[in-house]
Image (tube, coloured by chain):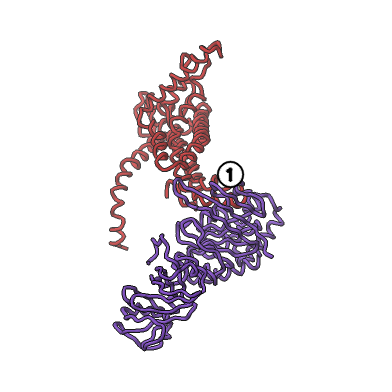
Amino acid sequence: MFNLKKIKQNAPAVPILVWTGILVGIPLIYVVVLSFLSRDSLGNIVFEFTWENYKRIFDPVYLKVFYNSFLLAVLTGLITLLIGYPVAYFTANLEANRRSLAMGLIILPFWISSLLRVYGWIILLGNNGLINSLLLKFKIIDKPLTMMYNFGTVLVGTAYMLIPFMIVALYNSIDKLDRSLLEASYDLGASKWKTFFKITLPLTMPGIAGGFTLVFIPALGLFFISDLLGGGKNIFLGNLINAQIKGRNRPLAAAFSVGMIILVLLVLYIYTRITKNKKEGLFL
Amino acid sequence: MTKVLLQLKKVNKYYGNAHILKDISLDINDGEFITLLGPSGCGKTTILRCIAGLENIDSGEILLNGVSIKDLAPNKRNVNTVFQNYALFPHLNVYDNVAYGPRVQKSLDEKELRKRVAEVLELVQMSGYEKRMTHQLSGGQRQRVAIARALINEPDILLLDEPLGALDLKLRKYMQTELKHLQKQTKTTFVYVTHDQEEALNMSDRIVVINKGEIQQLGDPREIYNNPRNLFVADFIGDRNITRVEILEKNNNHFKLKLGSNIIDIKCFAAAAEDCEAGETAILAVHMDKVRIYCTETPNSLLGEVISIHYAGSQVRTEVKIDAEIVTVIEYQNSNCDYNVGDKVYLSWEESAAVLLPLEDDTEGSNV
């Protein structure tokens, strides 16, 4: 029962458990509890149990927001995957010193404020922005294209913001791939494309799933990108939660947060199913 | 009349400035078991990869059945490789691994494929393992699957890159016999790469000894073992004592040699000995296990002093100092007499045990 050896073995884990308990566990419990509470007319929290907040999620207006956010996150995952895979593949096949340079360049934008980088897109895509000015100047168009403030703009901005996560996850997976397997495939008669689809792609599936998860989760909650690039016309989960907190309806914000956490857990479940029995993964 | 299947003509290969293969020319006959033997880094694996198409050659020509294949991609060449680490696909089971070749080439329909996979798995004694994943197999089993996967394409040539390197000694010996048997059974040409002389001598019809990107000698195992053409081969194949001697007299195949203060007569019919002339310094290479130790004076022998005796199971290694040289003798519990460290003994050997070789300028790397 009282196993001293086991206690000694697990002792180093205690600070970590305390740490995550304080910083993750307690806030999480707070959010869940909050989501079941009511508020008075001034927006103060009243300790009275209610399902009302969860019922309101199923209001079609709010369901549409969930759908928008889910679509945005999935599309962001797909776009970053399609662009990130060739980049990661190319980078992983570079010589060692060029490889670290390339990875450095991919990670470099992280050092610049993400807000500034979003403003960069406004300068690029705005009605008086760089692209429109150039197109007008060369008389390719006669009035500015509307590229701002729609779903597509938010998607581009979100994908741009999160693509380094995808590339790093894919890079690690592709880098680990045993090159002799590719040689064996060519040797057995497969073309480069067949080798890619039959060997490279299945064996880098953990990286794909990992990258997708790493991109999907933040894409679901980012709100400043849709504020700045979406112009408030497209409401996503992040905006909604942000707005409810500002509007002093914190219990409803908490309920939306719990809904978002459930979406995230769903993706994580799929992720663990894909990487099960594989020797790599984010949680192994 | 044997038919030449594969021809390498003056093949050169560079990695940056390093000249990896230097004018390699080699004819490989249909149906033979030929081994490329040499120390690591000698270029033997590179030759294999050039044949497979996994490396491009910088100059020269590779002909398969008289047709140039040097510009063909690996998937267009009818040769298959058994890789050193087997390179089995970890996400596929044994059946799918073996079926990979015909599937990507779309050469068989699923029904024929099932039959064919069953055949090759039977051939390598792996029937019943179809559903296993490769990580559930032992080293020897993976080896067999790798061979089956390569053989299912019925290649003109099967290339094997040190396939037994990762196996333990006992399994290695067993697999040597198996491979030889398999080669006879399938009548496929095997090009086998190894650094292990015993493996090479055991299995091969012919051996190509390679060092520093050059072919040192080509011949059947007996010839390579008994009649080395140069110092490298003499030193690399078989455990030999390599000593410097002075040639006092030469009379056709008879030589009078001076080794330290000893003078002996030997007969040597090796081709290399013809280049040795009286008055020159040469290399005398004698198999360690063919030297006999006598305690009493013996005609035509070397006088020396025993400096150490090591018992290593069935064999006894004795080191004898002859003036400045140390000669190692291996006996298999069959000593002529009892001797101890410090005793004076006489060393003698049968005629065929010794080879006389001309001294080369480039003797670095050998223990002369």
**In this orientation, which residue lies closer to the viewer: A121 or B151?**
B151
Q: Residue at x 45, y 78 (%)?
A: B266
**In this orientation, which residue lies closer to the viewer: A63 or B165?**
B165
Q: Residue A37: x and y, percent? A: 39, 34
Q: Residue A168: x and y, percent? A: 43, 40
Q: Residue at x 32, y 78 (%)?
A: B308
Amino acid, disc 1: Lys
Q: Is residue A120 visible?
A: yes
Q: Residue at x 50, y 53 (%)?
A: B21
Image quarter in which the N terminus of chain B is found:
bottom right
Q: Chain of mark 1?
A: A
Per the image, label 1 sits on a secondary structure element best described as helix
**In this orientation, which residue lies closer to the viewer: B262 or A87?**
B262
**In red, which chain?**
A
In this rendering, the answer to whether B17 lies above or below B159 is above
In this rendering, the answer to whether B9 lies above or below B189 is above
**In purple, which chain?**
B
In this rendering, the answer to whether B117 lies above or below B62 is below
Q: Residue B71: x and y, percent? A: 60, 45
Q: Residue B85: x and y, percent? A: 50, 58
Tell me if mark 1 has few (under 14), some (14-19) or many (20+) residues whose alpha carbon lies within 10 angstroms of its own.
some
Apparent side of residue B189 relative to residue B36 in the rendered image (left or right): right
The residue carrying mark 1 is A192
